[in-house]
Amino acid sequence: MILLFLKLFLAHILGDFVFQNEKLNKKKNINALYLLLHITIHGVLLFLFFASEWREMWQTILFILSVHLLVDSLKSLANNNWPNHSFLIFCVDQAFHCLALLLVVIYWHGFPEQWFNFLLSVDFLLYVISLVLIVFVCPVTLKILFGRWNKELEMKAKLNESLFDAGWVIGIIERILIVLFIQVGFLSGIGFLLAAKSIFRFGDLNNTKDTKFTEYVLIGTFSSFLFAIIIGYLLKVSLLYLI
């Protein structure tokens, strides 16, 4: 089972990342011939990986190529309609490709009982809850917290000077890192993370001499770190005493 998935996955990443250059990636969004060329490359790779099993696997390979063609067609359509959401589209695209590979593995080997046990286990649910808290709950909580200051005109102007949603992305990444550091016992990593952010962020703030915005960023940084530390330790304690 694992060997089948690894062969399928290796063929996928070779076709999508190694043998697909930037020119082909852009052209396939506007020209169906380039999309078919991309699918053909995947077909050749799958044939090479399963040459000795071709008679048994040809229907499976045809299914994978058909799904890949459908998903990439939808991705091209989405990229043309929502060019500012390319990263999200890319993630969804890759998720569907991997799901297709998993479906193939399940078709050939069945759904392993240990997968059910893992997906319904306490530790997995705790990790999922922690991730949801980090990615969704914390940003909403921080947005409500900063609602009283975001209404100020000068604060709005300062926020518009930064990259779109950059603060949201940075906050999610730093909270994930903090929770990870707590789980592995690398607490000094939190200090390094804060120091690195201070160097890049607070240096610019010092040059602007804007007290209000400096206070705004400080509150945001410390609040984000505090939420992440609380989630990290709650997760660690729960993993120790609930399973």
Image (cartoon, rainbow, N blue to C red):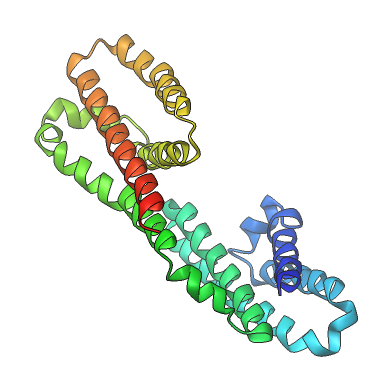
Could you say where residue 9 lies in the image, as x and y percent from the top left?
Answer: 70, 65
Identify which residue is drawn at 56% across, 74% down: 114
Identify which residue is drawn at 43% across, 67% down: 121
Number of marks in the image? 0
* Quadrant for the C terminus in the image: bottom left
Could you say where residue 60 lies in the image, as x and y percent from the top left?
Answer: 71, 84
User: Residue furthest toward the right?
Assistant: 52
Could you say where residue 133 lies in the image, as x and y percent from the top left?
Answer: 30, 51
In this view, 217 is above or below 237: above
Could you say where residue 207 lies in the image, as x and y percent from the top left?
Answer: 33, 10
Identify which residue is drawn at 44% across, 61% down: 124
Residue 164 in view (yes/no): no
* Quadrant for the N terminus in the image: bottom right
- Determine which quarter of the picture holds residue 208: top left
Identify which residue is drawn at 24% across, 19% down: 214
In this view, 32 is above or below 10: below
In this view, 237 is above or below 8: above
Which residue is nearer to you in this view: 148 or 163?
A: 148
Which residue is nearer to you in this view: 119 or 204?
A: 119
